[in-house]
Image: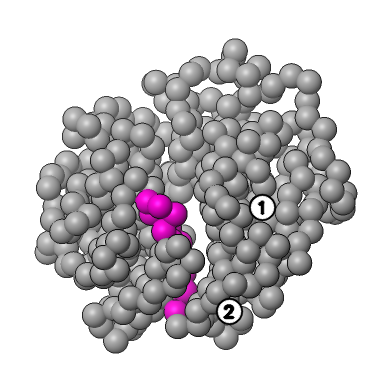
Amino acid sequence: MKKTLQFAALAGGAALILAGCASAEQPASDPAGSAAQTAPAGPRVAVAYEGGVLVLGGDDYENLGEFDSEDFIRLNSAGDGRHVMVTTSKGFQLLDVQQPELTDLVVPADTAGHVVSHAGKTVLYDDATSDTTIFDSAELAKTSDALPKAEVIPGVTAHHGVSVELEDGTLLTTVGDESGRTGIRVLDQDRNEIASNDECPGVHGEGTATGETLVFGCENGALVVKNGEITKLASPDEYGRMGNAYVSENSPLVVMDYKDDPDAEGYLLRNITLIDTEANTLEKVALPKGVEYTYRGVGRGPDAEAVLIGTDGKLHSIDPATGEIVSSLSVVDPWEGPAEWQDPHPSVKVAGDFAYVTDPADSEIVVVDLTSDEIAKTVKLDHVPNEIAVVG
């Protein structure tokens, strides 16, 4: 079953408005185009800090605006070239990084979770209900006073999950309940189940490789979904958890994080996983001594290489076929793992040819040109950076 909803702006947590299948009216002018006349060209970097979010822009990454928010927020690119989804206690709030403006537009969610953009769709997941909300990304980019219509697929049982829609309208969504997560379901365009797998305990993380091959992490391996078929790849250890997928849609090779000790204290990881979605193989690779990372510390570069910010303070370029470190660049001071996963610690986001590394110790963003393996810019901030999202 599916519903088509249209959302109104939330003023102090106002209610959701049901609008059947009516299309949202679009503004006569393009607000993104108007903003471009006053704001500098170039990429936008949204930076979360305690109590707010700021937007950097232009080739010099100047501060274009700061906005008050909650003490801890999460940031995800909306995939529409204009917005960042700010996760708050009320839901998914739209940050227009082109204006910039932290808008009053909020997609309500009791527990706002994952944001996935793929195939021209922006997909939001509410952990408290397991509802999936799907926007057309191009329509989302035109948003002015009201959000465009959205498809909402009601959840079955609430859990911390994720959904993604493919080009043909097929929807993949996780399965679980309050006692645990178990696997995935595959729904056709009419939202009827056509496939499922319940052999993925602790399912978490999702990524799309070339040919719309998807991977999902499990506590004992990974699921690979290719051409409608679901294949389980086993971890080399009895407990071998993969919770985050770092992918390039131009490569069949997937890099995932890896934890092999369920009782390990802290959040630092010492191994990575390499998955070949064409050969359906999974390999655990140990990083060199002294190189550890967290779930925030990995991305994929312009040549599909993995880039990893290690506790040694270096940004490492890793061959996704072998796990070999092919180059390293010192970008921040060596650091220790966070006491809590939400705490600020070095993280990386990649957009185009550049990697953006947060440096909480010095309140900076370090911009690295991955084509020349050099630091292109160091941006000083007035706040300690936590999460970041890059648009453009």
Amino acid of disc 2: Gly
Tell me: 277 left or right of 194.
Answer: left
Quarter location, residue 72: bottom right
Callout 2: SS: strand
Magenta segment: does it hold 204? yes
Mark 1 or 2: in front is 1
- Please state the horizontal and vertical placement of residue 270, each as a whole percent of the image: 22, 67
Taking 231 as reference, is 97 above or below it? above
The mark found on residue 134 in the picture is 1
- Please state the horizontal and vertical placement of residue 271, each as a whole percent of the image: 23, 67
Give the mark nearer the N terminus: 1 vs 2.
1
Q: How are the colours assigned in the image? A: one colour
Magenta segment: does it hold 358? no
The mark found on residue 176 in the picture is 2
**Quadrant of the drawing holding the N terminus:** bottom right
Disc 2: CA contacts within 10 A as few (<14), some (14-19) or many (>=20): many
Q: Are marks 1 and 2 in contact (CB under 8 Å)?
A: no
Determine the CA span between mark 1 and mark 2: 20 Å
Residue that appears at 70% across and 62% down: 190
Q: Would you say residue 366 is visible in this rendering?
A: no
Residue that appears at 48% across and 18% down: 41
Looking at the image, which is closer to me, 103 or 7? 7
Amino acid of disc 1: Ile
Taking 31 as reference, is 118 above or below it? below
Callout 1: SS: strand
- Please state the horizontal and vertical placement of residue 78, each as a whole percent of the image: 57, 43
**Residue interval drawn in magenta:** 200-214
Residue that appears at 78% across and 33% down: 145
- Please state the horizontal and vertical placement of residue 321, each as a whole percent of the image: 19, 56
Tell me: 101 left or right of 355.
Answer: right
